[in-house]
Image (tube, rainbow, N blue to C red):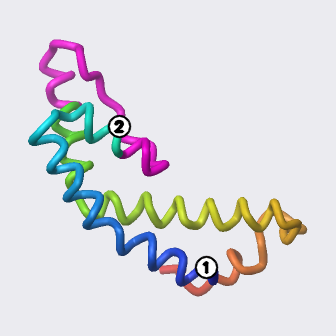
């Protein structure tokens, strides 16, 4: 699949993931949403689920907010799609330098 299409498809799932995390947090707590995040292959926000302190409470609140944000999911899903694509290119032997030609073209086209 073309790299642009792959990134586009991944980003489309951001709303679904943020809604699922919202459901999980409301029904089962933050731990469930963090596990869901891991199941998607995304590194969840770091926080202690058991520590009792004002800072731990703050970190849990930040983690919860991140998991509910569609923008947070979009960034991570885009990065994962790009990393997965590049790993496939490496496995196929299509990377002769540090980066595949397709990813290089994608990066040049998407610079801000």
Q: Which of these two is toward me, 38 or 61? A: 38
Residue that sits furthest to the left in the current view: 26
Q: Position of residue 83 (x, y in %)?
A: 62, 60
Q: Residue 71, relative to residue 67: is it above or below?
A: below
Q: Which mark is residue 3?
A: 1
Residue name at image x 23 percent, y 54 percent: 20
Residue that sits furthest to the front in the current view: 27
Q: Quadrant of the N terminus?
A: bottom right
Q: Residue 104 appears in which quarter of the rendering? A: bottom right
Dot 2, crowdedness within 10 Å: few (<14), some or many (≥20)?
some
Of helix, strand and loop, which one carries label 2?
Answer: helix
Q: Residue 10, relative to residue 56: is it above or below?
A: below
Residue name at image x 68 percent, y 75 percent: 103
Pointers 2 and 1 in contact (CB under 8 A)?
no
The range drawn in magenta is 37-59
Q: Position of residue 86 (x, y in %)?
A: 70, 65
Q: Position of residue 35 (x, y in %)?
A: 35, 37
The label nearer to you, 2 versus 1, is 2
Give the dominant element type of the magenta stretch: helix, strand or loop. Answer: loop
Asked whether, in this view, residue 19 is left or right of residue 102, the answer is left
Q: Residue 55 appears in which quarter of the rendering? A: top left
Residue carrying label 2: 35
Of helix, strand and loop, which one carries label 1?
Answer: helix
Residue name at image x 20 percent, y 32 percent: 60
Is residue 76 located in the magenta-colored stretch of the structure?
A: no
Asked whether, in this view, residue 68 is left or right of residue 97, the answer is left
Q: Which of these two is toward me, 39 or 62? A: 39
Is residue 45 located in the magenta-colored stretch of the structure?
A: yes
Q: Position of residue 82 (x, y in %)?
A: 59, 66
């Amino acid at each position: 699949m073309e790299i642009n299409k792959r990134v586009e498809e991944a980003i489309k799932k951001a709303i679904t993931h943020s809604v699922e995390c919202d459901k999980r947090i409301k029904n089962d707590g933050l731990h469930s949403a963090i596990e869901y995040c891991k199941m998607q292959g995304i590194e969840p926000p770091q926080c202690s689920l058991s520590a009792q302190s004002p800072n731990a409470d703050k970190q849990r609140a930040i983690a919860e907010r991140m998991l509910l944000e569609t923008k947070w999911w979009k960034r991570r899903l885009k990065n994962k799609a790009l990393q997965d694509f590049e790993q496939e290119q490496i496995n196929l032997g299509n990377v002769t330098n540090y980066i595949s030609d397709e990813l290089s073209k994608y990066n040049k086209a998407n610079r801000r």
